[in-house]
Amino acid sequence: MATVTPPTQTPAAPVQDRSVRPNAVLAAALLGFVVISLDALVVNVALPDIGQDLHGGIAGLQWIVDGYTLTFAAFMLSAGAFSDRVGASRAFAGGLVVFTVASVACGLATEMWMLVAARLVQGLAASVTMPASLALVRQAFPDMHERTRAIATWTAGGAIATTVGPAFGGLLTSAWNWRTIFFINLPIGIIGLILLRRAPHSPRRAAPLDLLGQVLAVLGLAGLTVGVIEGGDRGYGAPEVIGAFVLAAVAVIAFLFVEHRQEHPTMPLGLFRLRPVSISIAAGFAVNVAWYGTIFLLSLFFQQELHRNALVSGLMFVPTTALVALSNLFVAAKVIQRFGPRLPMVIGQAGTVVGLILLLFVDADTPPALVALVAVPVGFAGALAVPALTGLLLGSVEAERAGTAAGVLNTIRQTGGAIAVAVFGALVASQAGFAAGMRISLAIAAIALGLTAVLTFAALPGRKAPAADR
């Protein structure tokens, strides 16, 4: 079985010519991450207009959203390994080109099936681009302190894009039409590709692709995601939902067996023997359950309980967005550099738990501004934890494994967000009512984060740096 042994010293910085510009590489990676994160949510407020224009029913509108999420989560793990094998810069360029072309296809769609098909391709391209973008940042910034700041900037871009997505989509749809939410990706993609010309040479691994492992990973993640999402809509006793879960279970068991025996596995199981990697992945899952779950719940709460429109609901996230950026750009990097990753991870997770508990007390009589203020700790504290856990994971593996490790982390985080939205959606739509379902959902997120916070505190050393960076 393939294992990953952390190196005992800092890898030597790659030799770069004068054309290499780390900040330009960071900007390219940031643009890719922003546009991917934005497209995960920007479409939601435009769904009524799309349905009217393309004469689609509820099922078609659901697939516009779910198609992107499903292919994004299902293929991300394999895409991380693909990034390692072809090189991060090549994977990023290819993914961004396909994503941009698919975005144009979305905007030009004249039938519902055309738009759904283009969204499926968007999700696949996004799964390739995201882990490659993070691997590019690692390669462009070999110094641990500079890399920590760069990762914080990268994370801030994604967090801001995720939060402003509904408001941005509402603005574009109201001012022009729904097609502009896809056409806006064209100039962003072109700029990202131009900036990528300043990237350093990306190392490649000549090992053959683990096609069977990749297929099983995709089937397992797809089955799990379909089961959770469709279970919330059709009921978890529906035959197709049970079938999806059975498929997921069989595929995951087969995947673990294949990866254990594979000489060149898609996901080296030895990664999970590294304590920092396992803790980073667990914390990343819990943080995304809280983050995506809270955004989803509050978007519904503002519209259904407080009777605000989609644009106003999106604007209610601005206080959290601003402090997420502040935490990522100015706070997280300094705290990590001074105290190591454990303290910001623990504080970030614990602070998010506090925010979730405060949200348990809001109701239909709570002023929207107060709800927005109470939600701030969820974003601010979570933004402190994510750069720390990401840097911890990347600093614990060799440079040539960065794409694979990033793919594993992002796959688990994306799956956490998808599960949160599906399960929390089922809870707020249950017979118990929206308010009770929202409180149960927030409690679940708080418990999950509380457990990973305790695990982080107990299992990680204090200021000890990851082995790959010492």
Image: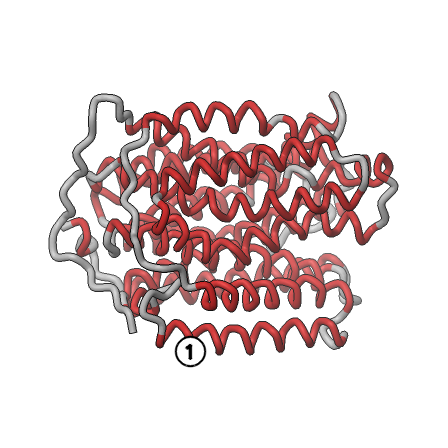
Q: Residue at coordinates 55% horizontally, 44% vertically from top-left?
A: 374
Is disc 1 surrounded by few (<14), some (14 to 19) or many (20+) residues within 10 Å? few
Q: Horizontal and vertical percent for residue 209?
A: 40, 59
Image check: 402 left or right of 295?
Answer: left
Q: Horizontal and vertical percent for residue 101?
A: 60, 33
Q: Horizontal and vertical percent for residue 30?
A: 43, 33
Q: Residue at coordinates 14% horizontally, 48% vertically from top-left?
A: 10
Q: Is the residue 370 above or below the residue 418 in the image?
A: above
> 263 or 299, which lies in front?
263
Q: Residue at coordinates 74% horizontally, 77% vertically from top-left?
A: 237
Q: Is residue 436 visible?
A: no
Quarter-wise, where is residue 432 in the image?
A: bottom right
> 197 or 285, which lies in front?
197
The residue under label 1 is 257
Question: In what quadrant of the picture does the N terminus appear?
Answer: bottom left
Q: Is residue 72 visible?
A: yes
Residue type, mark 1 in image? Phe
> 64 or 318, which lies in front?
64
Mark 1 element type: helix
